[in-house]
Image (tube, rainbow, N blue to C red):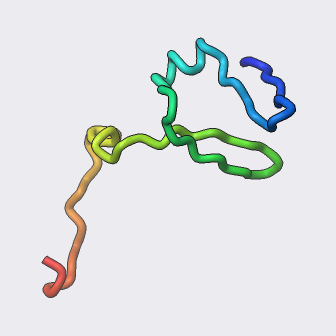
Amino acid sequence: MSAVTLSPKNQLVIPRAIREAFKLTPGQRIEVLVHEGRITLVPIGPMRGLRGLTPGLDTAVPRDGDRV
């Protein structure tokens, strides 16, 4: 875990080890979520990056006849 300091311009610097671990790049968008008194930063990546995230998931979904 790392501690960071909010700058006078209200900016945070994400420590290098974390940037490298999550392969964050300059200009990359990050979602900021607030939940139960916590701030969570979630990197936003391309949808294709999610491919294979849930191996073995059954994708056979019953569909109405007009939704095939």
Which of the pair 43/55 is nearer the observer?
43
Which of the pair 27/41 is nearer the observer?
27
Q: Residue at x 50, y 24 (%)?
A: 22
- Residue 48, placed above or below residue 63: above
Q: Residue furthest front?
A: 9
> In which quadrant is the C terminus drawn?
bottom left
Q: Position of residue 16 (x, y in %)?
A: 60, 14
Q: Where is residue 64 in the image (x, y as percent from the top left)?
A: 20, 83
Q: Where is residue 34 in the image (x, y as percent from the top left)?
A: 73, 51
- Residue 2, placed above or below residue 41: above
Q: Residue furthest right?
A: 8
Q: Where is residue 5 in the image (x, y as percent from the top left)?
A: 83, 25
- Left or right relative to 67: residue 31: right
**Picture quadrant of residue 42:** top right
Q: Residue furthest top?
A: 17
- Left or right relative to 55: residue 16: right
Which of the pair 29/68 is nearer the observer?
29
- Left or right relative to 67: residue 15: right
Q: Which residue is drawn at 63% across and 39% down?
A: 41
Q: Which residue is drawn at 51% across and 28% down?
A: 26
Q: How many marks?
A: 0
> In which quadrant is the N terminus drawn?
top right
- Residue 66, placed above or below residue 27: below
Q: Residue at x 65, y 47 (%)?
A: 32
